[in-house]
Amino acid sequence: MYSYRRIFFIVFILLIISGCAVQPRVVTDEENNARITQDLRAIEQDHDAINGPISLEEATARALKNNLELQIELTQKTLAQKQLNLKSYDMLPKLVIDLNYSSRSNYSGASSRSLITGRRTLESSTSSEKDVFASMLGVTWNILDFGVSYYRAQQAADNVLIQEEQKRGAINRIVQEVRSAYWRAVSYQRLISRMQSLKAEIKESLDQIDQMDVEQLNNPKINFTYKRDLLGIEREIGFLQRNLSVAKSQLAALMNIRPGMDFTLVAPERGEFISRLNLELEEMEQIALESRPELRELFYKKRANAKETRAAILQMLPGIELGARYNYNSNNFLFNGDWLSLGSQLSWNLISIISMPAKLDELDTKEKLLDAERLAMSMAVLAQVHVSLAQFGNLNEEYRSAYNFYLMQKKIIEHSRIEAQLGKISRHVLIREELNTLLAEARTDSIYSELENAYAGIYVSLGLDPIPGDLDKKDLSVLTEKLTDHWQKR
């Protein structure tokens, strides 16, 4: 009989174990399609309609409001704030309620036997009913856990500040990327019709050369040379078009505009670069060391590490727990069915004393690492300030030269078009000058884009916020207006 029970028990356990086994389940096509539909709907929802040409300020505002990478940073900061709120509850006493109901098919009973004589001393009796309900409401507070939780909450508060600095860094990076992509996209918008028109002229000229070869109206070598030059011009236009065409897609991605959606940009007239810096080098270095998000983040990490050291020291101390409980029991055999109990408990993990030197040594090494990272980052920040200034100065001079070259080429093409109409120069020469003008414009726009990027890079190297305050909640028009006012004051 015993063996049957054992076999039944083993079979029962095996059935439970097999029933709890979980197998991997591959996502189905229906689930995958539902995810795609949901993601596309989420990407497109709550986006402001495009009602006209997009300015640089509006493009930046759209990126700050809709960019998905920035949304990750904002969500991480929100999560850090929620974690701080949660850590604050750990400092409170624990309020525990316990409800228990037990029922038996018969009464529990027991008798006694003398340990000296071995004789039974009492007849079987019971002190409990078959159905018993018990409850307990208690408050416990561990003084050691309170101290540790206090430092953990302070670390969570530092983590909120760390996430804020990471958000600032992400905003600086996105603003700089938008600025660079915007001006390259403007250049593409300015030149695309000219490039297509010039390619059409080249195709027409190539067809004429082919016809001349068929009719043998010219020296074949002259035709081949002319055709080679035209194919070279076509290749340069194609190379230029490929380099500029991706800028608009990159800008759309930064603004979280779905790829393929058409939009136009505000294209200002070409002119001299008028933005200037009114700061001395020493002042810029001081601002960078005070404001760079990376340095501020390392400061908060070091402060959090110091609090971890205090928490580790507290964990080495004995823990004192104070408690008060109110108890109730429905058992009628009890003389007092409800009672209040007070208690205290002292516990000490002696292993923590043994491991404390190793723990403190680890934290001390981590602090030294943070100090080394801070010094290395400070040197890198100072270098970035100098490099950004040098890049801005070089590009400023390069743009001035390119812009003057463009103005001169503009005068040349105006005279060339007049001479072509009068028959003084060939169409081949005019096409070559058209290409030179197109390349001069593209070169001017390209350097201007790099110059705008370098100008924004100076503010990134300084760690200055490119937006006025926290504008996460603002709508697009207000954010665009605030950015316009903020940048015009610089």
Image (tube, rainbow, N blue to C red):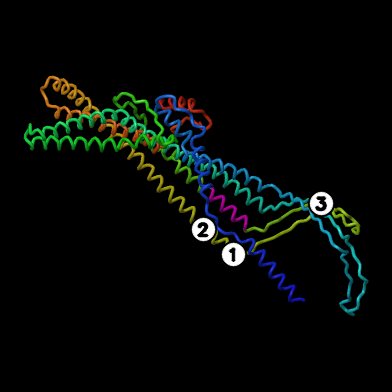
Quote the CA–CA distance across marks 1 and 3: 39 Å
Mark 3: few/some/many CA within 10 Å (<14, 14-19, 20+): some
In the drawing, does residue 50 fall left or right of residue 1?
left
The type of residue carrying mark 3 is Tyr
The type of residue carrying mark 2 is Glu
Expressed as whole percent of the image width and height from the top left, the position of residue 346 reads: 71, 59
Query: Which one is closest to the eye, mark 2 or mark 3?
Result: 3
Q: Which residue is mark 1?
A: 354
Identify the image quadrant of the C terminus.
Answer: top left
Q: How many marks?
A: 3
Q: Main secondary structure of the magenta part?
A: helix
**Vertical position of residue 347 compared to residue 276: above or below:** below
Which badge, 1 or 2, comes first in the chain's sequence? 1
Going 89% across and 71% down the picture, which residue do you hit?
111
In the drawing, does residue 252 fall left or right of residue 228?
right
Q: Which mark is residue 326?
A: 3
- Given residues 451 and 397, the one toward you in this image is 451
The type of residue carrying mark 1 is Ile
Q: Which mark is residue 362?
A: 2
Going 43% across and 32% down the picture, which residue do you hit?
466
Which badge, 2 or 3, comes first in the chain's sequence? 3
Q: Is residue 14 magenta?
A: no
Q: Is residue 312 magenta?
A: yes
Residue 401 visible somewhere in the drawing: no
**Element class at badge 3:** strand
Expressed as whole percent of the image width and height from the top left, the position of residue 436 reads: 20, 30
Expressed as whole percent of the image width and height from the top left, the position of residue 481 reads: 46, 24
**Magenta region:** 304-315
Residue 143 visible somewhere in the drawing: yes
Quote the CA–CA distance across marks 1 and 2: 14 Å
